[in-house]
Image: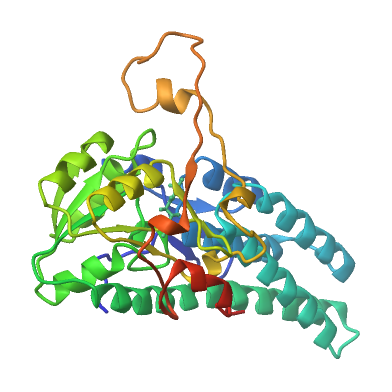
Amino acid sequence: MKSFFPYDSVELSTNGREVVILDQTQLPTQEKFLHLTTAEQIFYSITRLKVRGAPAIGIAAAFGLAMCVNRFRTRSLQALEKEFLRVKHYLYISRPTAVNLMWALDRMERCFYATKQGLETADEKHAIEVIRNSLTAEARAIKTEDVKMCEVISEYGFSLLQPGCGILTHCNAGHLAVSKFGTALGPIYMAQQQGFSPRVFCDETRPLLQGARLTAYELTKAGIDVTLVCDNMAATLMAQGKVDFVFVGCDRVAANGDVANKIGTCGVAILAKYYKVPLYVFAPTSTVDLSCKSGDDIVIEERPAFEVTDMYYSKPMAPKGVKVYNPAFDITPAALIAGIVTEKGIIKPRDIKNLKKGK
Ligand code: MRU
């Protein structure tokens, strides 16, 4: 599959000493790349959504951990291990809902200890070098595997589509949110390449406007027919018969097939059920968390009030001091989902518990 973009949203520099991200808070007006060289910068970029989207957060954290280990000056293996664990635990709590973050960091930890255990040398300098190389390779592998997963997911999603069909999407599960291509938007890129001319409706996704700022930006850049609507216009589109499918990404899938995704997804899913529009959730297996029995076990991030009252407005849009509730995600019950599209196929939500995860 060919990418419509000359850059990825997250990269590790060739020498492994910088994490380069496209600052998503500056889109769509500026394509500004940030070169991150400390754990604090990685943490800040994740919490402030400069890098965002479940797989992209996992990749950024893995790259960040490798970068910090590469930059840490020491001759002591014990000191390196201490620093590795410090950064790992610090990044672990940068955002709570997308499980890809924890999944990627845990995978890096397994790599650290497997490499350490396999060391045959007593030479600490050499051992440190081997661990650095191994962590850098593991972080790069997380991204490479995500690219492959996105391609396979895109193929499965594409198999659902017909030429000229209308797709509604919420938030941003595209090129920006992953390694390359996207999950929910991947089939749309593939459809465009196959001459299907899909018609996409993206809702703005209040309060942080990922739909307006990011999805509309990505799809416009790729020359795809995209129409931006406010969040409360989805029912009107569905009632007019303009939506054949709803495609959304996701931040965590529980064992019973409930999913956490951007706030507003559940509302769209209820509408889709009413109007008999199938809703598909796109998720690499790194997003599945079988330790959560149901959506009730998924931690939902709450974000600051100013994102609702002030951010993206030129002046405050609510009385000063008004009470604000700003959950960043909601739970869509399994019963509202037609299928979960993973790199292992399109799975009924109730069957997700049988899924064997990768590494
Ligand atoms: O708060 P965000 O912008 O990180 O939320 C992102 C989403 O909800 C996406 O739909 C999800 O991460 C899927 S990414 C392929």
Quadrant of the rendering where the N terminus is positioned? bottom left
At which x and y percent is residue 233? 21, 37
Is residue 117 in sight in this rendering? yes
Residue at the far bottom in the pictured view? 120
Q: In this view, does 323 lie to the left or right of 280?
A: right
Q: Is residue 185 left or right of residue 297?
A: left
At which x and y percent is residue 160? 24, 73
At which x and y percent is residue 320? 46, 8
Residue in front for this viewpoint, 188 or 339: 339
Residue in front for this viewpoint, 210 or 87: 210
At which x and y percent is residue 48? 51, 40
User: What's the residue at 76%, 82% (across, down)?
Assistant: 115
Quadrant of the rendering where the C terminus is positioned? bottom right
Q: How many labels does the image show?
A: 0
Q: Tell me, what colour scheme is on the image? A: rainbow
Q: Is residue 319 left or right of residue 64?
A: left
Residue 235 position (above or below residue 88):
above
Residue 340 position (above or below residue 47):
below
User: What's the residue at 43%, 71% (across, down)?
Assistant: 348
Residue 10 position (above or below residue 40):
below
Q: Quadrant of residue 74?
A: bottom right
Is residue 18 in sight in this rendering? no
Residue 94 position (above or below residue 175):
above
User: What's the residue at 38%, 73% (across, down)?
Assistant: 150
